[in-house]
């Protein structure tokens, strides 16, 4: 035992020599396998990471987060509910057939068809219809004026109409084919997916001949894979993993502040937290600076509201609650909530350390927090259930992958939403107004109102802006983005 | 005798049916996959709509009968998450699972039997005690820890074996060792007792009187007599090796059905979980039926049993 | 009864040591096992700070590892002992019943045993935790209710043998009440083998709790158990070895001692090896 340990320690100090030669292949370690290859079905991170490299989108985001053309070259609104897209004519699918407006219309109609039962339906169901309106033109109609439309279209993959109809939905899910930089070469379910470069890709020659996405559920094993050169890049590391990897010469840590906000949900409709004073006390009991410096080791940025600066609608002039345990204790005493028991619902998907740190901080101001860990499905059932079922507290890491406040505070706090355990007509009016006007200035003004209300009512506390951490071989060049997209086309080996 | 076998087979099928029913009820009590299938910003109405479309708002009994009806046509159904036939998903994993189970069994038997023999021969000596500690050591460490230590030592530090995956012939070695060390103790224990038994018999003395070396005589008899207990223990362990290797499969990224079952439970992908359970229980029951029949054949007194 | 050999006495002493550690945890632990200091995270063994001296270092929330280890013995031992008690009681009762009554109860119970044994225990445990939710009592119930068939098998086989003995038949003829025969005559005769199963299950249960902790469904934080300390420390295998090595060593020593004791018991009770 002791000897084994010595041997291990010795091994940890040195990294085995790596073949420095530039490879023509890229190997990615992901936590899981692709669930569906059909880009209009599952939207979990692992599936997303793989299949989005096979397809193109109508619009995309550049490295600064701005929405820029991809299949569409330009777009304009003809009225509040109608938007016209001009399309490129030089894009070919991987089987050589051209990408036409009919394919774009088919892609939209397919995902909004209730009979198709796409899990992504709620992201696109504001679209009423799509029509071909010219040889290289498509027109979309929305049910109401819908400012988040372009942000949602960033995630809509364009699928080939004729090919999908020929193979059927199930066949397409097995053998997907798109117009993107890579095509599916081999898919061993549960093991790995291998993509091969599409040499005729319209945006240029893809950087690697093949890209292999392996399913490796355990983070410690993924790191071992990186250290031995079995994998070139992996995602989803913790700040502590990043610190541990800093001494490895063959590896580097890539990180980027994301649109994902870490927040503490506080139930405003049931239990001791129904009293707004208790909620305000909780906001003042949490030492967010220490969470960021000690727990996140700097891999996080402070936020004043439940939103990140990477989202549209972020307002920086609303002050966050200060860390003031003495005032928090006094408020709790005033509310008669000393020693009140709060259930903190969570699942293994959320950072255990943050839960326990919050538990201690609230304990110090006189609240008894009980952490209840359930598996993810049970957790969702309770968290999204009635206010009585939802517990008093929980941690969240929210991203709508749309970089818009509408995708964050609307589902989290609008009354009637499954996540919301809070109701304030003035807040509802503000977020409703912000989602049905197109003018950005007017929307921003509504969000300012909404966040001012949230600050006083505290149905949740923004903890920090999450930072996505990746580890890669030193000679892999890539700049990760705030929306956590993983486009292989943007990576390359340095010679 | 044939009637007896038919009875046993019938009872075994009832047991498999029991397993399936237990798992069906427990699974459905634990909720349904609708909430995991929709994006986080879905509305309550959209969720209710999807739940209805998937049929999870029907009474449990109706769902159960529908499932049995499907099974009666040898149809395992479609995975809700992967939108592919369950049979295809399961079939992709079975070769890996069988490979790992057999390799782990080989490790357990290959190390366990010699260790058991040595422990019997050296009985009472310090060497036997030491061996007992070594044999039990594998059973006394959590695999989520021993697994990562094996990866760090043989994969990272020494660089002898792959750290994860199932893509080369040597990939199976580390997970098989991690799993086999846990199972080894059972075989060693059984072998030691069988060996002690033999050492106390008259024929050992007789064999030696005939001039046969003691070792050869003992080994031949012991191995013959131990064959059936070995099969019995292997039969008992097979269920655990097939789908209970959840943690080892997770640590080593081995794409077996244990991992599939865990992921499917987490995703509430009911039909996949049920298919895994059905597969494992049929294999388990089949193996034990064979072991029972072998016993009955050897020792007729047991035949009157259930 | 022969005096146990010194090696066995040593094992018993180790076990007793762990039990004392669990019972007297508040007296033995130098610090509050739950008190975090986020600015003193992951300090190596022997670190001395203003807050005190951390003999075994601190964990990822800056808590004293030694104190957590001492308190962790409580949760680990309590889960194992209670779940063994639940499964031993349930399993033996059903085994006695099916071996004594035979007939339908035998068929139903033993097929149920087959069914239960054919589902890998870890899957069944994860499923039941999903339904019941976490917590100490529920964890004990989950473990107890998934492990009883092992005892039933042994109790059943032993009861079959013992019930066929002439003196039991004689007692039955003499009009002794069945439950009296079961408790007074049969149970004492089959207790030995059941005890052997219980010892090996005890070690398994400790590992099982650790495994469920690894899957995030074990003892609830912040209460420490050896399994939960290890599964949390596993993220730091390279950076903070002490987080897994110390609880791992304690767990190893405990489970190994229990298993060695079990093997010794088995030897003492097995009539075949006793002939030698």
Image: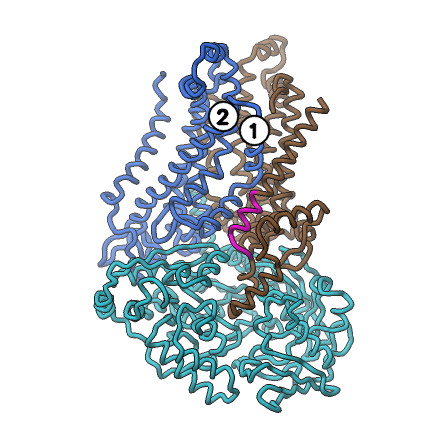
Chain colours: A cyan, B brown, C blue
Q: Is residue A494 above or below residue A385?
A: below
Whether B115 is among the magenta residues is no
Can you give x and y, in whole percent of width and height, for residue C215 in the image? 47, 51
Tell if the residue under mark 2 belongs to the same chain as the one under mark 1.
no
What is the distance, in whole Å, between disc 2 and disc 1 at their CAs? 39 Å
Residue A47 image-quadrant placement:
bottom right
Q: Which mark is residue C97?
A: 2
Residue range corresponding to the magenta coloring: B22-32
- Give A202 or A122, whichever is nearer the viewer: A122
Q: Is residue C22 left or right of residue B228?
A: left
Q: Quadrant of the N terminus of chain C?
A: top left
Which residue is at a point 53% across and 38% down the rendered structure image?
B181
Asked if residue A397 can be seen in this view, the reply is yes
Q: Chain of mark 1?
A: B
Camera-nearest residue between B65 and A488: B65
Nearer the viewer's eye, disc 2 or disc 1?
Answer: 2
Instruction: Report in which chain the residue with disc 2 lies.
Output: C
How many marks the image carries: the answer is: 2
Residue at mark 1: B114
Would residue B293 appear left or right of A347 to someone viewing this image? right
Q: Nearer the viewer, residue B291 or B234?
A: B291
């Amino acid at each position: 035992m002791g000897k084994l340990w010595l041997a291990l320690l010795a091994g940890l100090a040195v990294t085995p020599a790596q073949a420095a030669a530039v490879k023509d292949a890229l190997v990615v370690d992901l936590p899981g396998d692709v669930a569906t290859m059909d880009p209009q079905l599952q939207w979990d991170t692992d599936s997303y990471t793989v299949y989005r490299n096979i397809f193109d989108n109508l619009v995309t985001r550049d490295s600064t987060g701005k929405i820029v053309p991809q299949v569409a070259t330009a777009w304009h609104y003809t009225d509040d509910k109608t938007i016209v897209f001009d399309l490129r004519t030089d894009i070919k699918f991987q089987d050589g057939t051209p990408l036409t407006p009919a394919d774009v219309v088919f892609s939209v109609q397919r995902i909004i068809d209730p009979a198709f039962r796409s899990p992504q339906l709620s992201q696109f169901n504001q679209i009423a219809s799509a029509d071909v309106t010219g040889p290289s033109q498509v027109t979309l109609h929305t049910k109401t004026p819908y400012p988040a439309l372009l942000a949602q279209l960033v995630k809509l993959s364009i699928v080939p109409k004729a090919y999908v109809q020929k193979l059927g939905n199930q066949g397409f899910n097995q053998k997907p084919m798109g117009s993107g930089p890579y095509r599916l070469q081999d898919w061993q379910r549960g093991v790995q997916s291998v993509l091969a470069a599409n040499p005729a890709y319209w945006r240029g020659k893809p950087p690697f001949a093949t890209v292999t996405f392996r399913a490796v559920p355990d983070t410690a094993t993924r790191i071992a894979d990186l250290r031995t050169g079995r994998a070139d890049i992996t995602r989803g590391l913790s700040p502590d993993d990043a610190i541990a990897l800093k001494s490895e010469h063959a590896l580097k840590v890539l990180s980027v502040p994301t649109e994902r906000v870490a927040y503490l949900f506080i139930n405003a409709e049931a239990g001791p937290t129904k009293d707004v004073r208790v909620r305000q006390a909780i906001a003042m009991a949490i030492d967010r600076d220490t969470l960021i410096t000690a727990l996140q080791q700097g891999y996080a940025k402070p936020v004043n509201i439940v939103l990140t600066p990477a989202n549209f609608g972020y307002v920086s002039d609303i002050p966050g609650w200060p860390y003031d345990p003495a005032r928090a204790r006094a408020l709790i005493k005033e509310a008669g909530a000393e020693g009140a028991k709060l259930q903190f619902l969570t699942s293994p998907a959320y950072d255990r350390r943050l839960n326990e740190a919050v538990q201690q901080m609230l304990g110090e101001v006189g609240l008894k927090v009980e952490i209840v860990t359930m598996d993810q499905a049970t957790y969702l059932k309770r968290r999204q259930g009635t206010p009585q079922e939802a517990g008093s507290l929980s941690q969240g890491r929210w991203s709508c992958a749309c970089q818009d406040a509408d995708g964050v505070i609307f589902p989290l706090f609008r009354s009637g939403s499954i996540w919301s355990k809070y109701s304030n007509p003035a807040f509802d009016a503000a977020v409703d107004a912000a989602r049905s006007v197109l003018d950005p200035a007017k929307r921003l003004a509504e969000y300012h109102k909404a966040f001012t209300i949230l600050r006083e009512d505290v149905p949740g506390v923004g903890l920090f802006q999450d930072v996505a951490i990746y580890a890669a071989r030193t000679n892999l060049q890539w700049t990760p983005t705030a929306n956590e997209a993983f486009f292989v086309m943007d990576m390359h080996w340095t010679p | 005798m044939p009637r007896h076998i038919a009875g046993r087979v019938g009872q075994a099928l009832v047991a498999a049916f029991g397993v399936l029913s237990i798992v069906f009820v427990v699974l459905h009590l634990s909720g349904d996959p609708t909430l995991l299938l929709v994006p986080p910003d879905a509305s309550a109405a959209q969720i209710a709509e999807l739940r209805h479309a998937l049929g999870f708002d029907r009474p449990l009994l109706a769902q159960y009968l529908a499932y049995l009806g499907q099974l009666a046509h040898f149809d395992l159904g479609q995975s809700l998450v992967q939108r592919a036939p369950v049979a295809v998903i399961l079939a992709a994993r079975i070769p890996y699972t069988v490979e790992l189970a057999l390799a782990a069994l080989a490790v357990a038997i290959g190390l366990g039997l010699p260790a058991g023999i040595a422990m019997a021969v050296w009985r009472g000596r310090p060497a036997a005690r030491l061996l007992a500690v070594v044999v039990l050591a594998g059973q006394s460490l959590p695999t989520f820890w021993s697994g990562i230590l094996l990866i760090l030592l043989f994969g990272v530090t020494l660089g002898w074996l792959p750290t994860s995956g199932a893509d080369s012939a040597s990939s199976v070695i580390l997970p098989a060792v991690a799993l086999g060390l846990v199972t080894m103790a059972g075989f060693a224990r059984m072998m030691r007792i069988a060996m002690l038994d033999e050492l106390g018999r008259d024929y050992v003395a007789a064999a030696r009187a005939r001039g046969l070396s003691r070792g050869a005589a003992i080994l031949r008899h012991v191995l013959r007599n131990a064959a059936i207990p070995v099969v019995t223990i292997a039969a008992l362990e097979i269920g655990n090796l097939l789908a209970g290797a959840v943690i080892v499969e997770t640590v080593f990224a081995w794409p077996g059905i244990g991992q599939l079952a865990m992921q499917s439970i987490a995703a509430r992908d009911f039909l996949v979980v049920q298919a895994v359970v059905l597969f494992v229980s049929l294999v388990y029951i089949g193996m034990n039926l064979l072991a029972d029949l072998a016993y009955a054949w050897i020792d007729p007194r047991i035949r009157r049993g259930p | 009864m022969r005096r146990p050999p010194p090696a066995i006495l040593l094992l018993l002493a180790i076990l007793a040591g762990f039990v004392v550690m669990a019972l007297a945890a508040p007296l033995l632990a130098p610090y509050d096992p739950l008190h975090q200091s986020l600015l003193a995270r992951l300090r190596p063994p022997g670190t001395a700070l203003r807050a005190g001296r951390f003999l075994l270092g601190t964990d990822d929330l800056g808590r004293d590892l030694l104190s957590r280890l001492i308190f962790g013995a409580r949760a680990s031992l309590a889960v194992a002992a209670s779940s063994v008690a639940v499964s031993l009681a349930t399993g033996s009762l059903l085994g006695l019943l099916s071996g004594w009554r035979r007939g339908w109860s035998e068929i139903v119970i033993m097929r149920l045993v087959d069914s239960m044994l054919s589902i890998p225990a870890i899957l069944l445990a994860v499923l039941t935790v999903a339904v019941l939710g976490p917590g100490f009592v529920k964890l004990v119930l989950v473990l107890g209710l998934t492990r009883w068939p092992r005892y039933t098998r042994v109790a059943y086989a032993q009861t079959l043998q013992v019930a066929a003995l002439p003196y039991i038949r004689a007692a039955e003829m003499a009009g002794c009440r069945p439950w009296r025969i079961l408790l007074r005559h049969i149970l004492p005769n089959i207790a030995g083998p059941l005890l052997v199963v219980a010892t090996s299950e005890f070690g398994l249960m400790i590992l099982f709790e650790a495994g469920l902790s690894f899957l995030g469904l074990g003892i609830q934080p912040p209460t420490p158990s050896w399994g939960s300390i290890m599964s949390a420390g596993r993220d730091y295998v390279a950076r903070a070895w002490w987080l897994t090595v110390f609880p791992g060593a304690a767990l190893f020593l405990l489970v190994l001692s229990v298993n060695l004791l079990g093997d010794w018991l088995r030897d003492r009770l097995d009539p075949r090896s006793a002939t030698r």
